[in-house]
Image (cartoon, rainbow, N blue to C red):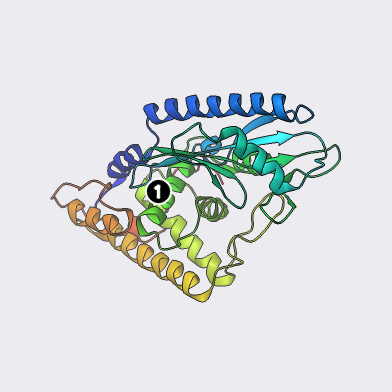
Amino acid sequence: MANCHNLFGEFNTEISLTSNKKTKMTTSKDGLRERIRKHFKLHHPEYVPKFYIQGSYKMKTGIRTKDDICDLDDGVYFFRTPDVTATTLQNWIWDAVNGYTSTTPEHRKKCIRNIFSGDYEIDIPVYYKIYGKEYQLAVKNNCWEDSDPKELIDWFNNKKDPHGKMIKAIKELKAWCDHKRNKMPSGLAMTILAMNAKAKIVLNDRDDILLTDILREIKKALAQKFECIVHAAPKDDLFADYDETRKSNFLNNLDSFLSDAEAALKEQNQLKASRLWQKHLGTRFPDGEDKNEQSNSSVATTSGAALSRPWGK
């Protein structure tokens, strides 16, 4: 069978955030924070903003899309009970950051999105917290809802492996969804599905085998119940609003990806195997060498057990 482990290493480097992107996003994040602090000190001094980076950037699972766009979520927190609506508080954030970029910020349902055209986006969700109560997330035109991004980060950090294998696999799954698009699941959904699958497999040394094992477990879980429950407040189901078309699109893509992944593991020619991976991961996945490798069917048919190292679940 063709070993594509090194190709996955190259692919992960290709889809990962570059140091230049990280530097620019950090500079922009700091600039936006300073504008918010100054705006509130001048116009709403009774509200003192605090900040917390969250989401994929915090978990180190962020990727660059095939359009070379990446994102950062930077929550703003107020430790007091608001005397204005959730939408008004979001509007105040919008007022603070408007003009920082040449593109007008977007007032989305659960955040204010700052667009750095053709480069990256910084989303600013708005929260408040009072003692003894859950964190409350502002939802446009719909008051507040329980939401604890730190609880989600803690859950992820407690479940991830010390060698970063799952971080790489999650980035690959997100790149798959980005390549296919057409309302494929969010990065958060794929993170949760992958980490749920981790509990049922042994993490393999081989990235190609590991990803195949994860896809197989995701398919099994969704066949039992099509849901994706967030492991933090409000513990909602990310698939709750999927209609049959969107659900079928995802499951059909999953079936196709798993079928080709299993075929790639059995393929002896690395170039042919890489072409199977490229069908689902895109052209950023590199070509393999046009050479045959010695067949090892036991590796391809035992969910990676033959080449695994017991790094734990």
Judge left or right: residue 272 versus residue 64: left
Instruction: Measuring from the top left, give residue 268's x and y in whole percent.
Output: 20, 56
Q: How many marks?
A: 1
On screen, residue 273 above or below 152: below
Viewer can see residue 149: no
Residue 7 in which image quadrant: top left
Circle 1: residue type: Glu
Residue 154 in which image quadrant: top right
Instruction: Measuring from the top left, give residue 46's x and y in whole percent.
Output: 79, 29
Viewer-proximal residue among 221 and 177: 177
User: Which element is circle 1 on?
Assistant: helix
Which residue in the protein does label 1 denote? 172
Viewer can see residue 41: yes
Q: Residue furthest left?
A: 290
Image point (32%, 53%), residue name: 281
Judge left or right: residue 75 versus residue 162: right
